[in-house]
Each structure stands twice: as C-alpha cells, then as structure tokens.
Amino acid sequence: MKYLTIIAGFGLALLIAGCGNKEAEQAANVERHLRTAEAYTQQGQLRAAMIEAKNAIQLQPENAAGYMALARIYNHMGAYGATQELLESVVTRHPQTSTLLAEAYLNTQKYRSTLEILDAHPAQETAEQYQQWILRGRAQIPVGDRSGFDTTLAQLETYDNSGLDVELLRARWALANGESDLAAKSLTQLLSQHPEHFDALILQGEIALYRNDLPSAEKHFTRALTTLGTTDIMTAQRIMVLNQLTDVLIREGRTSEAYAYQKLLSEANPESHSAQQRFNEALALYQDGNYADAEAVLTKLHEEFPQNATTGTLLGLVQHQLGRDESAAELFDQYIDPETASTSLIQTAVLTKLRADQDDEALTLLKMASENQPQNPALLASYGLALLDRDAKSNEGALALEKSLALDTSQQRLRIALAKRYFALENTEQALAQLQKAYTEMPLDIIIQQSYFHALIANGQQAEVKTLIAQFQQQFPDNPRGDFLAGWLAYEEKQLAEAQRAFEKAIAHPDNREKQFAYAGLAQIYTDQQKPAQAIESWQSALQADPAMIPAYGHWLTLMQSQKRTKEAIEFLVALEEGSQQWQPAVMLARIYASQHDIQQAITHIETAMARSGNSIPVKQLAANLYHQQGVALLAKKQPDEAKTFLLRALKLFPDDMRYLGSMVQAELGVQNIAEAQKLLDQLTSTQTNQAARFNLQAMIRIAEKKPEEALQLYRQSWQSTPNDTAAEALFSHHQKNNPQQADAFVDEWIQKLPQSAKPTLIKAMAAQRTQDSAKAVKWYEKTLELAPQMPAALNNLAWLYYEQKDSRALELAKRAYELAPTSAAILDTYGWLLVESGDVQQGHRILEQAARAAPDNEEIREHLAVAKERL
C-alpha cells in the first residue's frame, strides 16, 4: 500500500512538472512570436507581422502583449476599425491597450470616445503617459475644449524634450481655429529645426493647399513621403500623402504624374482598388436616382466586404430611397456612428426609423448623436424638435433648442417651437418674448414674422401688430411686404376694402417677389364677398407667381369644381406644368385624373412629377399607388400580363410594401403560377411588422394549392401575430360555414381588437338588416360610415333603411353611393327608386333603366322600373 502511494505521489510530481514545463514553453513561444512580429514590422513585412501577433494571441489570449502588437500593426496600416473591434472587448481586462485604442478612435474622428477611454484607463508607464497626453490634446482640439487643452500642454511641458510636440499641438489648435498664419509661422520655425518631421510637413502642406499655394503644398507632401519607409502593405501615412499629392498634381494640371501616384495606390491593393471602382459605379447610380441598379452593385460589395462602413451606409441610403425602411434602419444601426456621422446622415437614419414605426429608436439615435456631437447645432435642434413633438412641454427638448441657438444664432425659427412650448405651459408672456426675440433678430423672415403677428392677434394685441407693421414700413420703405402686411391686418379686422387696396398696391410694386401672398389675400377677400370668378382668377395669379404654393391649389380647385369648371382647371394646370419645372402642377393633374378614374393619364403626369421632385417620397408614394391601382384594375379585366407590368413598377418604388406584393402574388395565382407566387413571397425579408401579412399571403398560396386546412392555420397565426382584416375575414367565413354562433362571437372579438375597422361593423349591420331589426341595423351602418364614410354598400343600405323610416337623409346617402359606384345594379336601383319617390321621376327612370341593363334578371329592379314608367 505504501509502495502504491509513493508511485502515485511520484506520478503527481511528474504531472506538475510537466504542466510547468508546458506553460514555460508556451510563454517562450509567445515571446518568440512577439519578437518576430516586431522584427517583421521594422522590416516593413506587415502581413507576416500580423500572422505572428495573431499566433501570440491564440497561444495566450490572457496576455495583453499579443493584442498590443496586433493593434500597433493595424494602426500602422490605418486599419483603425480593426483595432477598435480587437480592443474594445478586452480593454477593461487589459487596460494597457487603452493608448492604442485611443489612437484608433482619434484617427476615426471619435474624439469623445478618445477622451473617455483615456479617462477610464490612464497609463502607468511614463512613455505611455506621455503618448496619452498627446492623444488627449489632439482630441481636445476638435471638441473646442480650450481649458482642457491648456491643462494638457502644461502637463506635457513637465516632460523632458517635449517642446517639439507641444509646439506641434499649438499649431494644430491655431489651424483648427482659423489662425492659419500663426500656425504656418509656428510650423516654419519647427521645420527649420526638424526638417524631416512628418506631422509638421503634412500640416504645412495642408495650409499651403488651403491657400492654393500648390508648389509649396507639393514640396511639403513630397518631403513627407520621403520620410516614410517601404512596407509590403500600404500604410495609412503613405496612403494619406499619396492622396494629397494626387490632388495637388491634378489641380496643377499634371495629370500624368497624378496618374502615376494613383497607380501606386491601386497596385498596392488591387482588390481594394477594384472594390473602390465598383463603389464609385454604385455611387454614380445612386446620384442619378437609379436605386435598383445601385442596390444590386452594393449588395454584392456588402457581401464581400461586410465590415466596410461606407458600403453599408450607402446601401442603407439606397434602401431608404427604395422604401425598405426596416432593412435600411438595420444597416444604419450597424454602420452609423453617432459620434462621427454627418448631420444629414443622422437625420436620414432618423427619418427611416420613423417611417418604420421605430419612434423610440429614432429618438435614441438623435439623443446619442447630440450627446456625442454636443457642438453640432443641427443635431441638437433635431433632437429638441423631436422631443417637443412627442411632448409639447418637454424641458429637455427646450434645453436642446436653447443650446442649438447658442451655437448658431441664425436658427431663430427654433424660437417658434420654444414659443409653442411656453403656450402649452400657459406662459403667454415668455412665448411672446421668444417670438419677439426671433423677430428682432430676423425681421425679414416671413415665417417668424407671421408667427409673431398671429400670436399677438390671438392674444388681442392688434394695436401692437399695427405698430410693428408701421415700423416695418418705415424701416424698409421699398419692401412691398409692408403693404401686404397692412392688407393682411386689415383683412383680420374685417376691413375688406382697405385690405383689397393694400394687396393691390403690393401686387403693383415692380420688384415684388412675394406677389403670390398678396394674390392669395385678394382671393380670400373675393371668396368672402361671394365672387368666385374673381377669386379663381386671383388664385391662378398666385399659382403663376409661385407654382410651388401648395395650399393655393386646394382653395382654387374647390372653387373650380363648384363652378363646374374642371375641364378649364385641367387646361390651366397643363399650361402651368409646361411653363415651369415645379412638380406640384403635375401632382395636381395626376390627382384630378385619378378622381375621374383616368389612371393612365394620372400616371403620365405623376411620372413628370417624380422626375422633377428628385424622387420625393410623397410623390413616389402617389405614383406607386397609381401603378397599383392600374394593376388591380387590369387584373379585374383578366389582363394579368399587363397588370403585372404596373404592379412591378409599384414594387420597384417600394419593394417591401405588402399591398403591392400581395397584388402581385394574386396576379400570379390568378394564372395558376403558384411556384412564381411562392418565389415572390420568399424574396421578401421577414420582419416583425410584416409577419402577419406574410402569413396571409402564404395562406392564399395554400388555398391555390388546394390545402385549405394549412391555409386556415396560417390565417390563425396571422390573427394571433397582429389582428388584421384579411385574416379576420377568412376566419369569419370559416366560422360562418361551420359554426354560425362562433362566427357571431368572432365578430365581437374583431370589433374589440380592431375598433377602427369598418368591416365587422358592416357585418353586424347586414346581419341585423337580414333579421329585420331596423334600429340595430341603422346603428351599425351609422357606425360603419363613421369609420369609412366612402363605403358604397353601407351608404346604399342605410339609404334604404332611412327611406323605409321616411328619413329625409335617404336620397343624399343614395346619391353618394351612386357617385362612388355608378355601375352597381343594387346602388343604381336604390338611387333611381328614391329619385322617383322624391318626385324626380324622369331622372329616376333613367337611372333605373341603367340598373335594369346591369341586372336584367332582377325582379325588384323590373318592378321599380315599371312603376317609374307609369309615373312618367
């Protein structure tokens, strides 16, 4: 027994010794990889150096040295994103990596992240501390932290031989604050002592380039290039200098030399050069509005280079233009950095999220962006306005707007939003003070002026407005707006004759570029005086002066239609469309033709509007709706091929719109092309918001495949996912066939879960009408029309019930139903009979003849027509 114990102890000792030897051997291997990586780096063999550093990390992931070696190589190459990805997850565990991570942040313009990481993980070694102070100073310059910058310089000056770096930082500060002469003088002195200093040469070259001193810029950049060693991978410094030199040479007209440098760049990384060319192709397609082709190029690029933020961001912008908001939002989340992204990009991402019903995420993005870019007035303004839009009394929103105003005083219109907040808080004095301040700063801004004057009038201060207008006329005696304002105030005070004279005086002014407002004022006066012809003429003059004056179109068209002058309205709009490059006349023409059911003509004009509006989203949406409407109409006419052409146009504009996709699937199913319908559905990216619609479309496909049980299950899943009318109708139909009592209960559930849907209320009304419960039927039909005022069936049936109850509203409802569905036999019968009963026998007889032609076998219609003939 003792022998066995000795043997066992001996074995354990060997095991411990073996483990110790293995760890020592592993540590030695790591050290060898690190030394080799350093040697390769010094020799310019960066690819080999990366492999050695990665080997060190793989052997000892708990050792910070491997991460630091690899991060140094990445930073040397300019692969700052790779450094961030490598170190962000380990910097807490290995704080000694913080300097390299801060360097990567600084070079990607993430200045606040630079400062935060330096604060969180200060270096322990002297050399690292010195480097961190330099990084801190460079990050403090763009954020404008003068106090912090002075502290940094003071700290650096405590180190030996720091004078060169301190002077360089001072030059950077001067250059960033527009003091280029001071910066140039400092750099000239610095270069006289250190002629090969790379950073000083680059800064001096950039100053010369800014001054358009191209020979000096070339001299400094060329000298900077000579200070760099050669490597097997193009370093960040070399790429930067070559790009600068290429720019200088092109501007000097020395294209052949510029081409030589450009060739160096492309040959150093041919894969990257090819990708850049394809990206440029996609960018050109995007700028031309060819979003579908741009998406095709960018999708492939994104698959090949998923880490490339520029490609991912542009793909997001393309998908935003195509209406694929959820996909775009996903890409923006992945690639937009709130700390460095431009204002326009942040605002596009916010708009995308709003359109994708991601309101909270949109607000979060704005908050992060404004916190990370606290000196960006546009982002602060966007954030403040968004908060006040959500909560009219938001204190945080008001603070954001005030900060924005402090940074950029030209944004005086923001005070209008601040004034609205004070009005919401019932602090009228502060609200008017905001508007007064805005008006004092920008008295010629018509939006501010109108907001202020309207607010004063609303608070009973007409006398103050009159004084302000008089002051305006005195201060700007040659500005015709003074006459317009005088007319506007006279109109508000019901002094129409005085208002008319002032408006006419404003119009007569030869230099008036705001005549449209005075014409609009005249039109309002003529409307009040019951002079439609003069009002129409004035509105037309306003539109001719400014075809983009959207509110004028509605007033004018209402008058034209009331005067039965729709044909003249079309002629006027055609002339306006031809005589200007504005998109608004074309949109109005499209709407008029659509209301007349001339969809082809509507499409012609909406396509003109799309071209002129730069593919504006609302214009594109109207175009897509018209394409869809035409496609559905062609499907009803059994013309599936022509229908698909128009449906595809709608889908091209908004590929993720479930209505358009659903109609396309129906088109394919209509010609028994089930496989193609399935392919269409499979191509749609599944999201939380489209899940219910996907279930519905899949159910339609299963019905076409004669699999009703699977279809029913899919409709149930759709209803459970998101209650919707399509699934509800299918489930109600199933219950009605199999269990009428369950069908009644389901309708109640339908109303409870979709209280804004008119379909279940219509079912309730029709059921009550079938059982001759007139009171209940009237109640549910009235509810239906409250929810859907343009539903012909509800209008028709309620008209008949009113007729039976001798309610005078019956004829008006029947007429509305007829105007909406003039070919329906049942509606023609109701309207025709009610006309006969009301005494208009001739018109009623004519309508009943149309009903009889539409349904020749309907006995009730024949009886009504016979009675009408007798009464004639």
Image (cartoon, rainbow, N blue to C red):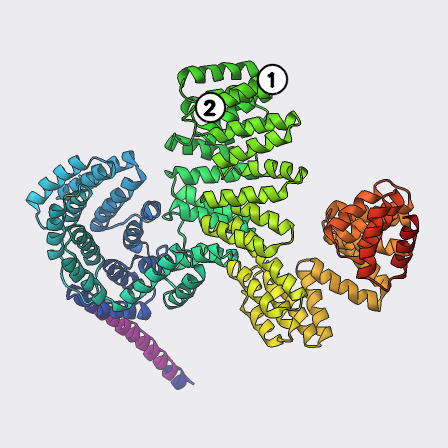
Left or right: 89, with 469 as reference point: left
Q: Position of residue 535 (x, y in %)?
A: 60, 30
User: In the figure, residue 95 lies in which quadrant?
Assistant: bottom left
Q: Position of residue 498 (x, y in %)?
A: 56, 17
Binning the other alpha carbons within 10 Å of mark 1 as few (below 14), some (14 to 19) or many (20 upward) gives: some
Binning the other alpha carbons within 10 Å of mark 2 as few (below 14), some (14 to 19) or many (20 upward) gives: few
Q: Is residue 633 visible?
A: yes
Q: Position of residue 319 (x, y in %)?
A: 47, 58
User: In the figure, residue 22 lies in which quadrant?
Assistant: bottom left
Q: Which residues are magenta?
A: 7-33
Dominant SS type (magenta): helix
Q: Nearer the viewer, residue 808 or 299?
A: 808
Which of pointers 1 and 2 lies earlier in the amino acid sequence?
1
Q: Position of residue 243 (x, y in %)?
A: 21, 55
Q: Is residue 429 visible?
A: no
- Vertical placement of 271 versus 170: above or below? below
Is 800 colored magenta in this rendering? no
Q: Secondary structure at mark 1?
A: loop
User: In the figure, residue 852 lies in which quadrant?
Assistant: bottom right
- Vertical placement of 623 versus 698: above or below? above
Residue found farthest to the front: 872
**Which label was assigned to residue 518?**
none
**Which label was assigned to residue 495?**
1
Amino acid found under the numbered disc labelled 1:
Gln
* Distance in Å between CA atoms under marks 1 and 2: 20 Å
Q: Nearer the viewer, mark 1 or mark 2?
A: 2
**Which label was assigned to residue 508?**
2
Q: Nearer the viewer, residue 106 or 846?
A: 846
The answer to whether marks 1 and 2 mark residues whose Cβ atoms lie closer than 8 Å is no
Amino acid found under the numbered disc labelled 2:
Ala
